[in-house]
Image (spheres, rainbow, N blue to C red):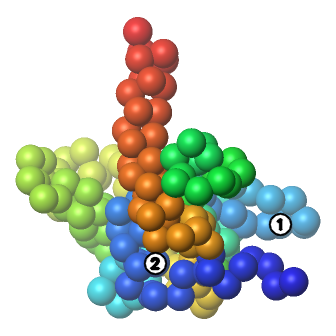
C-alpha cells in the first residue's frame, strides 16, 4: 500500500503557495548532531520563489540558518476532527487537515539594508489588504532592532502538499466535511480565546 495515499497529496504548486501566503507562520526544523532545533517563524514567499525571514540572533537555531544548511518547514492550514454525524453515509471518525512540507537550503542575508527591506516587505504583506500600518526603512527603531536579528533566505528544493479533506468520500460528504472544517475552525478559536483570556 502506498503512503501517503495519492488522493491526500496536493501537487498543484499554486495551491501550496496559497497555503504559505495564507498561513505564513512556519515550523522551521534544523538538525545538528542528530538533535532537532525547532522555531516558529513567519516566512514570506517572494517573487523569486524564495522564502524570506529573520530570527533572533540569540536563538540557538540562528547559527544553522546559513551556509546552505538544509532546513525542513511545515506550514499548517486549517484542521479539525470530523464526526461521522457530518456525513450523509455511514463513516468512521477522522481528522482533516491541510499541511505543506517544504525542504530547502538556507543562505544568510548579511546586508543590513536588505534585512531592513525584508522587514518592510513582511509588514506590508501581513498588513494587506487594509495596510493600516506601514513600517518605514528610516524608522529609528529599525536601527536598534537590526542588531538583534539575522536575516535569511531559503531556496526551496522540495514541496509536498498534504491535503486530507475527505477526498475518499462521495461528493456530498466531501462538501459536508469542508463546511465542518470551516465551522469547527471558527468555533475552536472562539472557545480557546474565551478560556485563555477571560
Point out residue 62 in the picture as x, y percentages from the top left corner. 62, 60
Image quarter of residue 191: top left
Point out residue 84 in the picture as x, y percentages from the top left corner. 62, 46
Residue 153 vertical position relative to residue 25 in the rendered view, above or below: below
Nearest-to-viewer mark from 1 and 2 = 2
Q: Count of labels shown?
A: 2
Residue at 52% across / 54% down in the picture?
Answer: 88
Residue at 79% across / 67% down in the picture?
Answer: 31
Point out residue 61 in the picture as x, y percentages from the top left corner. 67, 58
Please indicate, yes or no, whether residue 45 appears anywhere in the rendered image.
yes
Q: Quadrant of the C terminus?
A: top left
Image quarter of residue 187: top left
Between 16 and 10, which is closer to the camera in this rendering?
10
Residue 62 vertical position relative to residue 11 in the rendered view, above or below: above
Residue 135 vertical position relative to residue 197 in the rendered view, above or below: below
Residue at 48% across / 25% down in the picture?
Answer: 192
Point out residue 98 in the picture as x, y percentages from the top left corner. 53, 63
Residue 99 vertical position relative to residue 148 in the rendered view, above or below: below
Please indicate, yes or no, whether residue 185 appears anywhere in the rendered image.
no
Between 43 and 61, which is closer to the camera in this rendering?
43
Residue 16 — which label? 2
Please tell me how crowded label 1 is: few (under 14), some (14-19), or many (20+) other residues with Cα within 10 Å.
few
Q: Quadrant of the N terminus?
A: bottom right
Please tell me how crowded label 2 is: few (under 14), some (14-19), or many (20+) other residues with Cα within 10 Å.
many
Residue matched to label 1: 32
Real-space Cα separation, disc 1 to disc 2, in angstroms: 28 Å
Residue 89 — which label? none
Q: Earlier in the sequence, mark 1 or mark 2?
A: 2
Secondary structure at badge 1 equals: strand
Residue at 67% across / 54% down in the picture?
Answer: 91
Amino acid at each position: 500500500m502506498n503512503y501517503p495515499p495519492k488522493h491526500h497529496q496536493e501537487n498543484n504548486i499554486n495551491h501550496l503557495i496559497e497555503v504559505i501566503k495564507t498561513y505564513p507562520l512556519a515550523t522551521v526544523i534544523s538538525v545538528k548532531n542528530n538533535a532537532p532545533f525547532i522555531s516558529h517563524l513567519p516566512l514570506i514567499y517572494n517573487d523569486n520563489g524564495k522564502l524570506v525571514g529573520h530570527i533572533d540572533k540569540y536563538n540557538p537555531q540562528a547559527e544553522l540558518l546559513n551556509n546552505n544548511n538544509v532546513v525542513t518547514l511545515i506550514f499548517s492550514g486549517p484542521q479539525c476532527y470530523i464526526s461521522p454525524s457530518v456525513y450523509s453515509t455511514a463513516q468512521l471518525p477522522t481528522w482533516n487537515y491541510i499541511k505543506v512540507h517544504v525542504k530547502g537550503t538556507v543562505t544568510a542575508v548579511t546586508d543590513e539594508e536588505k534585512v531592513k527591506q525584508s522587514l518592510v516587505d513582511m509588514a506590508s504583506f501581513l498588513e494587506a489588504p487594509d495596510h493600516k500600518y506601514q513600517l518605514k526603512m528610516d524608522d529609528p527603531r529599525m536601527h536598534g532592532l537590526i542588531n538583534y536579528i539575522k536575516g535569511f533566505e531559503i531556496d526551496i528544493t522540495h514541496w509536498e502538499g498534504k491535503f486530507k479533506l475527505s477526498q475518499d468520500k462521495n461528493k456530498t460528504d466531501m462538501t459536508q466535511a469542508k463546511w465542518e472544517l470551516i465551522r469547527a475552525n471558527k468555533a475552536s478559536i472562539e472557545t480557546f480565546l474565551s478560556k485563555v483570556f477571560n
